Amino acid sequence: MPTDVVMPQMGESIFEGTITKWLKKPGDKVQRDEPLFEISTDKVDAEIPAPASGILQEIKVSEGNTVQVNTVVAVIGDASGASASVPVKAAAPAPAAAASAKKEASAPPPPAASAVEDEEDSDVRSSPLVRKLAREHNVDLAKVSGTGTGARVTKQDVLDFVEHRTAAPAAPPAPRQASAPAPVVIPGDLVPMSQMRKIIALRMIESRRTSAHVHCMFEVDMTRIVNLRNKLKNGFEQRHGARLTFMPFFVRAAIIALQQFPIVNGSLEGDSVRYHKHVNAGIAVALDWGLIVPVLKSADELNFLGLQRGITDLGERARSKKLMPADVDGATFTITNPGQFGAVFGLPIINQPNLAIMGVGGITKQPLVITDKDGADSIAIRSVVHLTLGYDHRIVDGALADQFMVVVKKTLENWGEEVG
């Protein structure tokens, strides 16, 4: 029997989504959990996986149309009864369908190995992303011990299993259908903004109108951390399967400062200030199609390795459109990194409803005057970064903002924590 593909419910506050791109066309074969189409909501852009294996029989909602959640947008038929030449229907939104109307497609013929894997994987509590990752690495999820809630198998569980097993190397992932080339924009063309661009524009203007933006900048000697990272990065990656980047150093330094000045981690609610119990660190990620700020929840409870893994995971899922709305909600303090593109420093706009945002400039070698313990001065080549703090002057005074940044500076310049 055919399976209806519906606009998914991406969060409690999400009621509609815009189909931005179909990754398959009518008549194409699809596998369960294979990316089928891309959507844009007021929270995230995301790839939506196919709910079943079979043939994409019909597309009911074409690219560029916005429909309510649970609207049927396509139909997947079984491999034996689908036509390869079914046309795309009109662009008008299809009527909303109840979630309960969603049916499971018939399984493809037995020889298809991926279908057998899907059946086996379906008995294990895991997400579509985890099942896809398991297939790419030739991992039987039934053999993986889940560490998530209710013994759910997580992405990290699969990666750890791959790293420690002694079996043959994993089979290479199946080639993904190439995306259509981006349209060539000629000067003078009038090009409509994407849904994400519209949302970014709206939020930037709202933030400027809401907060009294003031910035301060501090110069920080990063030589100690640069040398430490150069010494440890190869071993760190071999032990933990993750690159050692500079971002967790900045996040950890900010957390220490936020714990000493909790108002900077607050938010304004009417005429009151909300002091948040935990630090939910928003980490801005630059994408080819815009900017998004996924949130590392309760970052203050993570050790350095946990920070690095969390930052890496959020960045990867942001770039592969695997974020959920909950992943971009609840930030209490934001860090952005314009320095990755060569900027000396930036003056970032506050991510509402935060009271502050820290911008990280590029790390460069500069001559600095160094004073030794006896008071003698000398000039040395040091690795330097310029950090800026954008803060809401309605609540955070300049003196407090400077004191906050002094703690960040001292933490980085005198780094003494275990890196792992």
Image (spheres, rainbow, N blue to C red):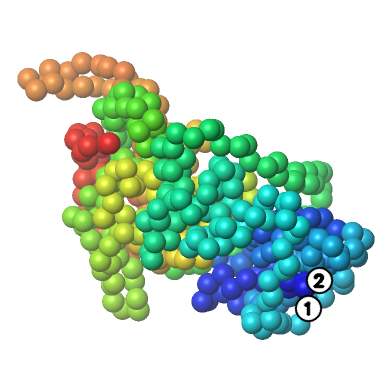
Q: Is residue 385 left or right of residue 185?
A: left
Name the residue nearer the viewer: 117 or 28. 117
* Residue depicted at 50% across the width and 61% down the height: 124
Q: Which mark is residue 94?
A: 1
Please tell me whether residue 228 is drawn above or below residue 74 in the rendered image. above
The one nearer the camera, 393 or 9, is 9
Residue drawn 7% across the image and 20% down it: 374
Q: Residues within 10 Å of mark 2 (few under 14, many from 20)?
A: some
Q: Which residue occupies the foreground of this view, 54 or 167?
A: 167
Residue 378 shows in the view: yes
Identify the disc placed on residue 60: 2
Q: Residue at x 34, y 47 (%)?
A: 307
**Residue 398 visible, this orientation:** no
Seen in the image, is 287 located left or right of residue 147? right
Q: Secondary structure at mark 1?
A: loop
Mark positioned earlier in the residue sequence (1 or 2): 2
Q: CA distance from mark 1 to mark 2?
A: 7 Å
**Residue type highlighted by circle 2:** Lys
At label 1, the amino acid type is Ala
